[in-house]
Each structure stands twice: as structure tokens, then as C-alpha cells.
Amino acid sequence: MSAETTQRSIDTIRTLAIDAVQRANSGHPGMPMGCAPIAYLLFREVMRHDPADPEWPARDRFVLSAGHGSMLLYASLHLAGYERPTLDDIKAFRQYGSVTAGHPENFMIEGVETTTGPLGQGFANGVGMAIAAERIAAEFDHGGHDLVPQRIFGIVSDGDLMEGVASEAASLAGHLRLGRITYLYDDNRISIDGSTDKAFSEDVRARFDAYGWHTQRVEDGNDVEALRAAIAAADADERPSLISVRTVIGFGSPGKAGTAGAHGSPLGDDEVAATKEAYGWTHEPFHVPEDVRQHLDARERGAEQHAEWQRRYDTYAAEHPELAAEFERRVVRRELPEGWTKALPRLEGKDATRKHSGAVINALAEQLPELFGGAADLAASNNTDVKGGGDFSAPGATSDSGEAAGRLGRNLRFGVREHGMASAANGMALHGGVLPYVATFLIFTDYCRPAIRLSALTGARVVYVMTHDSIGLGEDGPTHQPVEHLMSLRAMPNLTVIRPADGEETVDAWRTAIETEGPTVLALTRQGLPPVGDKPDRPVASGAYVVSDSGSGDGDPDVLLIGTGSELQLCVAAAERLTEDGVAVRVVSMPSVERFLAQSPGYREEVLPAAVTARVAVEAGVSLGWERFVGDQGVVVGLDRFGASGPGDEVMVGLGFTPDRVVEAARSAMAGSSR
């Protein structure tokens, strides 16, 4: 391998990025130009990956946290020999319908491990991937077969490290000694507004030293030998590693290198020509020299790595057939075990749904070993601990409770790091082999909302256990009482929100969440709730169902009462009073708006007959959105203000959540009905 071939390969990555951004007239050329040597080294030499099988479970993971530099990743995947993106895909960069989107999207191209762009998210995703890898290795690596060898590599930017979520995730990674992580920090000292000196003057290495990371410095980002040595040193250290690499944004551009002008805009035709002249590049746009293509093609190397691992795996499978079968189920096929639903408990007594949820977690823990998670310093309140499961912790750590600690621990202690927790959970889900759940109070979905949105965008199967779901939590007051949160979360595409009303609904809420290919929010109460009404076998799966009908059954009811969660019992109590007065009342439980809207028109009509226009929706949250179900003539018993501090039952009554108010609303709806 000659130095000339290496340089031409690096410049090919650069020029593909330059040409794609220029043709799109949109994008970020500067970061790929500066970081091309890093990508060259990782994809050609360092990382374990097989372009012919991008889902090979033993592969290393690469996370481009600085997702605005997406052309760096697209060029690297193309040159390594992945089926997509093709050269035509690269020419269609940032165009509608193209797989080469402006930021990397994991659902569009194999080889893109996670969707990045919102800064800091990829950094935290990688931490989650490392947690998942450590957990799976602890369960399956036996006898020195090294079944789970993967490392997590990433390129992170100044902007990533400014974001708070990266600090949360870095602190956790250092505490857990996640030595599989090697992040290369693109220290180009330029952000959109110009020099980072305007807002960012900290000693980054000192900060990461304090977190417990292994840190190094490479003074010249074009020095491939220095990069190679630094990565090798990182690999040898048991701590997570940050390599600070001094790069030049827009490297080679005579007029824009080292300036914000190279960050988020095309170079322009004249500057493209000048830059290519500086590289000594005389080819037409999008040209890949044949010797470079051969040099960067990773398919043969990947096939050899894959075959060598397969030989180890075959030996492992012969020695440990049951473990191998479980590995294939969880890690390779990502399937749930047969008969797992038999472990679901029957929960019929009065209790808080957060406690019912905890009972489900513990009932499923043995049957679903992939179920793995914890809370943001609220495990006792969220009821998320697997009893006797021990804490997932750094090697050699001890547990305060005396339970087993280490990589086999079932309970993750995220600390007060809601955003980092949720972002890491996405990485865990995308890595595979684990089914993550994470928990905090529903009010603090505000602190992890960007990660929840990316769960929805990426299709990551994460279960968000969000307790203390309304003003019913009581004395903590309006700072902790969610009001707008349920509806705002329901507005998010591809997110399922479930608010169960009792134990039976909570059990099916968990079953539904586990069976859903995507994220689910479980909104759970602090206060105890009684069992409510008769239920179908799957009360949550259909999103809504009829709890009771007080009419003769020969016709439509006079009024519909729709309730969710703790307010369903108010609907039931109001229906009893209305029935005594001769009113035909139907009570409907709607634990999941999204699930209900996904049902057939016939089922929706069966539950909520269009002919019945007298409707009341009852939920201790904002009324916005319920007009979709009650219509112009219906009434919403909601809360379009913040809550109040006091005992939960008194707050509910004081803010109007009583059977009397529901009765009044029903009569108002009937009076205004066209029927």
C-alpha cells in the first residue's frame, strides 16, 4: 500500500462529498473534507464489518454523531462495497425519494446504524450500543469464543460535545467503564456561527478525564499513522476512549478551509475547482479511480472476518447448543420466545398502575431475558426493578443492596439523566439482543423528548415507563403534574401512547408494547385504581372497547362517555347515576388513541357509533385533541390550566374531576345533540 494510494483514496472520499453537496446545492462539505482520513482508516482497516451482510451481529458499530457530515458516511459505505448507496444514490444526495438523505437515516440504507443529526444523540446512542454489547457478551460469551467482539466507533463534533445529552451519556459511560467505545472528536474549532471560541473554551480532554475516559490527542487529522496508533491504544484500554483529532474543516479549500463558510453550504463552482486543483484532482465529478475502488473495497476482508467468526460460532454452538439457539433467537432473528405471553400475570385488585407495571416486569423477567432497563434515579417510584436481578455495573463494582453486580445485572441505574437515558435506550434497541425499557415521571418526557422522537423516527422498540401521569399524583404540585404531555406525545408519528385504567389494562399494555415494532409510552398512575368493568381478552390491543352499555341493546345509546386511565372510573360512576335517571349510557375505555385509530372503520363505528353525537371525553389533561372523538356537539372534561399542590384526591375534586361534573357534561352534550 503506497502513500500515494492512501492519499488518493482519502481525496476520493473528499471529492465525492464535495460533488454531492455541490450538485444538491445543499449540505455540509467541510466536515467530510476534514475527517476523510478518519473514515478511510476506520472502514478500510480498523472496523470489523462485512458489506455483503450489513446485519452480521458481530460487526463493529459506526455512529456518525455529527450527522450533518452524512456524505462522509455515504461515500465510505459506497467505496467499501455496500450494495447501497450506489454512485447514482450519491448523485441524488438530499433529493426527494433518495436513500441518501440530508442526515443519515437507519431505515433507508443498511450500514447506517442509527439516525443522527440532532447533535449529541449519536454520541448517546453509541453508549447504549456499548451497554447492549456488554450485556449480551456477559450472557453468551463462554469458553473464550469471543462471540460478541464488537466495538463502537464514532465521529463526534464540537457541537455534539456542547449538547447536554452528550455530557449525560459520557458521564454514564465512564462510570460503567464501557471500554468498547472509541470516539474520534473532530476538533476543527468551527461551528455555524464561526470560531468555537465564541462559546466553547473548555478543556474537553480534562472533562472526559474527569468522567473516567481514556483520552488522547492527535495533532494532525491527516496523519494516518498517528490516528492508527491512537485507535490501537484506545482498543487496549478498558475505559471508553475519546481521541481528540485536530482537523481542518473544508481541508484543501483555498478560500474556505478553516472557516464557517465550509460548514453548511456548497463550496461553489469556482471554489470546487480550486479545491480539486489543490488536491491535484483532475477527474470529472463523482469519479472513483479504479485502483482506489479496489483499495477501499472491504468485501474480501469482511468475508474473511465473518468466516473466522462463523468458525468460532459453530464451535460454540456445538459446545453450548441451548445458548446458541437463544443467541440466534434474540440477536440474529430478534424474535420473541414462543409462549412468552403465558408468563403475563392476572392483576385484578386495586392498586396504582405503576405497581401493576412493576408486577408485569417481574413476571416477565425470567421468560424474557432480553427485557432490560431501569430508571432515571426513580426506580422505587417507577417500580422498574427486577427483584433480585442485581445492578448492571462496571466490572468489579459492588452493590449497596448486596445483590450481584456486574454485566449480568438486570437493573440499569441511569442516574438523573433522563435525556441520556432515553438516547442510550435507542442505541440499545438498535443494537439488538435486548428489549430496553426506561422510566421516569411523565412530566420529564420534556427532558427526553428529542430521544423519544428519534425512537419514533428510527422505529426503535423502546418501552417508556412514565409514571405519575396526572394531577392525581398530588402534593408535588404543578411542576410535577403533567397536563399537556399526553396529547403532545400522541401528536408524534409512530409513537404508541397507552394510558391503562387498571391492572388488566396494564398487563395488556405491556404485552402490546412488547409486540409493537416501535416505541411505546406507558402512562401510569401514582394513585390506586380499582378494577373497572368487563373486558375483552385484549383490552388495549384495539385501542378502545366498550366497558358497559346501560341501554336495552336494541339501539344506540343516548350518550357516550369516553375515559382514559384514572378517569375511566369517573365515567363508570357517572353512568350509574345517569342510568338511574333512565339515560342509556355507553362507557368506552380508550387506553390508546393510536391503536384505536389503526382499527378498521367498522370496529371504530361499532365502539363509537357516528349516529350518537352526544359524547363526553374525560381525561385529566388538556382538552385539545379530544374534539376528534366528541365532535362539535360533544363536551370534554379536561384541564386547560396547570395543576395544584395538595393530596391527590383533593386536587382531582378541586379541579373538577368528579362523577358529578361528568354527569353535568353528559346532560349538556345531550341537550346540544342533534338527536
Image (spheres, rainbow, N blue to C red):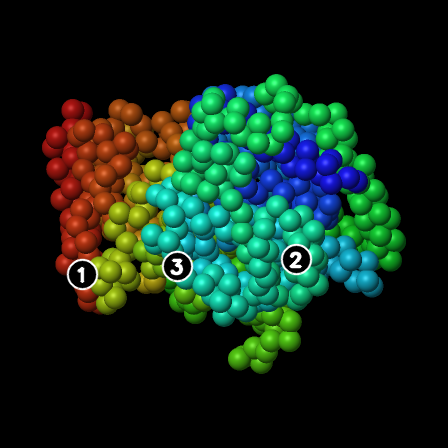
In the depicted structure, whether residue 577 falls above or below residue 352: above
Q: Is residue 278 left or right of residue 103?
A: right
Q: 650 or 390, which is in the foreground?
A: 390
Q: 410 or 123, which is in the foreground?
A: 123
Q: What kind of residue is marked 2?
A: Ala
Number of callouts in the render?
3
Residue drawn where x is 38% and y is 29% of the image: 604
Which quarter of the figure is the N terminus placed in? top right
Kindly identify which residue carries mark 1: 644
Label 2 Cα crowd, 10 Å radius (few <14 / some 14-19 / many 20+): many
In the depicted structure, whether residue 235 falls above or below residue 339: below
Q: Secondary structure at mark 3?
A: loop
Kindly identify which residue carries mark 3: 201
- Give how far apart the Cα atoms at labels 2 and 1 are: 56 Å
Q: Position of residue 457 (x, y in %)?
A: 47, 38
Numbered badge on residue 230 = 2
Q: What kind of residue is marked 3?
A: Ser
Q: What kind of residue is marked 1?
A: Ala
Residue drawn where x is 65% and y is 60% of the image: 234
Q: Nearer the viewer, mark 1 or mark 3?
A: 3
Do the residues under discs 3 and 2 have CB atoms within 8 angstroms? no
